[in-house]
Each structure stands twice: as structure tokens, then as C-alpha cells.
Image (tube, grey):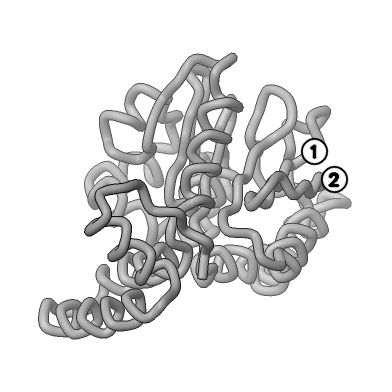
Amino acid sequence: MLRTERRGDVLVLTLDRPERLNAAPPALFDAIRAALAERGDARAVLIAGEGRAFCSGADISGGDVGPDTAHRALVDHYNPVMLALADLPIPVVSAVRGAAAGIGCSLALAADFCVASESAYFLHAFVNIGMVPDGGASWMLPRLIGRARAAEMMMLGERVGAAKALDWGMVHKVVADDALDAEAWALAERLAAGPSVALGLMRRALHAGFDSDYATALAREAQDQRSARATLDGEEGGRAFFEKRPPRFLGR
């Protein structure tokens, strides 16, 4: 259901239900949460889907989609993964081929960098079944693409193809389908070779910056700068600058 692989400093998580377009039952998100918690000293995470889709949405077994079941699935299984991703101190890359729908759309866009193939599309079609987007979509989409476009995605429930997603600033890059795996891997590997503590501080600042005032952001940057400079990578970056050579970061 979830393939977990450590490739160098990158933790690779692959949703592996291609026969269901990687529709995600609660147990699959539980597995993602466990893998993130047990990541060890990984310095980046890459999330992908097996086959022709990234994730076609939630899959609540038994066909029971009553109010209490949906609420319980979100509170106990899906939402904790979204919070765990937001709290990670290392960068996250998603590789999207085909459908990223519902909770799959939220999962893909929770990454710092979403690399999409030309066949990718992003969809919150809950309006068509009288429900609402979840997985943090109502918080995430307006911040990524603005209120008007978020309303278009949520209230009209239409697909946003890869080209439009790139134009809207929803994704980092669009590549040919057969180049997706290599492009996403190269980006994850590059991030994993970076100054991990500083990158984690950047992630935290980006999330906090949505909801803090300017003075608070300035104060946070000053504190983060002190924290980053005190790391081994901060020292190495300074030496490399003065020695006019590329830095060799160790993630510490």
C-alpha cells in the first residue's frame, strides 16, 4: 500500500495502489505518518504515486461515507498526516502524474515543491457530491493561488491541468511524463544535500509568515539567522564563501 525506501539522504514514499489510482484509505495515511515519524536522519522527503495517478482521493472502505465516518477519518487519520508534513524540519517534494484529487490534491500541494508531469491534473470535486474540500485545502489554496482561483477550484469542482497549475503558481515545474521521476528525484537529492537546519527554519518561516505581521517576521528571521549561523553547516557556508569554493553541507 505504501512503499518506503531510503535512497541516500532522501526518504521516498510511494503510494502503491495503482489498480485504484492510489486512492488512499485511512490505513495508507497512517503508514505515511509512521514513515515520517521514523524517518531517522533523512534530509528530504519525496512523495510519489505508482502507475498513472498520484492519488485519486480518499478511499473509505465499506462505502460508509456518513457524517460521523467522514469526520472520524479526517480527524484520526488524514489530518494528522497533513500536520506532520507541515511540521517536518526537512524539505518535501511531490511528483504528480495523472490525478491528484481530493485528499490527494492536498497531499501533493503540501510539498514545498510540486513537480507535475504534462498529464497531471489537480481536482477538488467535492461540490459535485455536496461535500467540501479537505486536507487543509481551504487554508492552502487561497495562499497558493489567491481567493478567486481557490473559489474556482472549490466551488466549480473542475480539473486544473498541469499547464494552468504552473501558470497559477500552484506547482514548481511541469515536465514530460517520462521525465517526471528523474526531475523530482534530482530536486529531492539537491535539497537533501543542502543545509538541513536552515532549510527547516525556512519551511517554518514560510508557514508562519502567512499569519504573522511584518515586525514578527523580522524578529523571527533574526532569531533564525542566529540559529542557522550556529550550525556546522552555517560555519561551513561561511568558510566556503571566503575560500571561494562550493560548500559541503552535512545537514548539521
- For residue 1, the mark is 2
- Which residue corresponds to the image point at 65% horizontal and 73% vertical from the top-left? 75
Of labels 2 and 1, earlier in sequence is 2
- Which residue corresponds to the image point at 81% horizontal and 36% vertical from the top-left? 17
> Of residues 213 and 75, which is closer to you in this image?
213
- Which residue corresponds to the image point at 56% horizontal and 63% vertical from the top-left? 85
Residue 165, above or below 87: above
Q: Secondary structure at mark 2?
A: loop
Packing grade of label 1 (10 A; few <14, some 14-19, many >=20) is many
Residue 227, above or below 40: below
Residue 160 rendering spot, x and y as whole percentages: 41, 30
- Which residue corresponds to the image point at 55% horizontal and 42% vertical from the top-left? 189
Q: What is the total number of numbered labels drawn onto the structure image?
A: 2
- Mark 1 lies on residue: 16
Residue 68 image-quadrant placement: bottom right
> Of residues 90 and 226, which is closer to you in this image?
226
Q: Amino acid at mark 2?
A: Met
Judge from the rendering whether residue 47 lies leftward or rightward of residue 5; answer left or right. left
| Quarter the N terminus occupies | top right
